[in-house]
Amino acid sequence: MTEPPTLKRAEHVRCAALPEPPGATWSNALRVGEELYISGVTAHPACRAQAMDAHAQALECLRKIAALAAAAGGGLDQVVKLVVYLTDIADKDAVGRARREVFAPPYPASTLVGVRELVFPEVRVEIDATIRLDARRGD
């Protein structure tokens, strides 16, 4: 008889720069072994305090992803997958420009999805990420 595999524990990653609201029913990031799963992040509340175009919102999202990666001991060069949600698919070029400013080739695998709306009317971009803490993108 074989032993069942040992299950890995999902570790809640906390980041002072991105506190979770009291009573939140999600985690900003969970680490399972060497994989880090980051929930969709947006430019809120910054985009509520000032008008931000899609490029600025994407940069803010990527800044938050970097902070969560750092809290888990990683960095943006370890992002292997992104999912980008846009309320206006025409913003794809602005988001692409932000990605080129933040990432170096080879770029993370990615999915781009057009959606009707996100959590607040001023939010135009949401990005979630998967990070491998035991790998770096590169040729």
Image (tube, grey):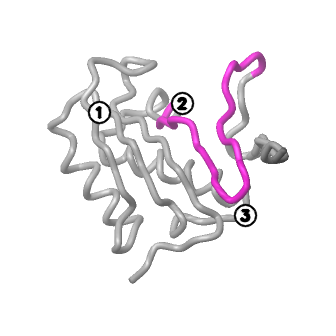
The kind of residue tagged 1 is Leu
Image quadrant assignment for residue 24: top right
Residue 27 % position (x, y) = 69, 32
Task: State the residue at coordinates (42%, 49%).
Answer: 82
Q: Is residue 109 on the magenta stretch?
A: no
Neighbours of disc 2 within 10 Å: few (<14), some (14-19), many (20+): few
First in sequence, mark 3 or 1: give its number: 3
Neighbours of disc 1 within 10 Å: few (<14), some (14-19), many (20+): many
For this rendering, which residue is in front, 131 or 96?
A: 131
For this rendering, which residue is in front, 130 or 69?
A: 130
Q: Which mark is residue 73?
A: 3
Q: Is residue 24 on the magenta stretch?
A: yes
Q: Where 53 sits versus 70, above or below?
A: above
Task: State the residue at coordinates (18%, 50%).
Answer: 93
Residue 11 % position (x, y) = 79, 44
**How far is mark 1 from mark 2, CA to CA?**
17 Å
Q: Outermost residue, bottom direction?
A: 139
Q: Which residue is mark 1?
A: 86
Q: Which residue is mark 2?
A: 45
Q: Where 20 sits versus 58, above or below?
A: above
Residue 122 % position (x, y) = 37, 24
First in sequence, mark 3 or 2: give its number: 2
Magenta span of residues: 22-44
Quarter of the figure that contains the C terminus: bottom left
Task: State the residue at coordinates (43%, 33%).
Answer: 50
The kind of residue tagged 3 is Gly
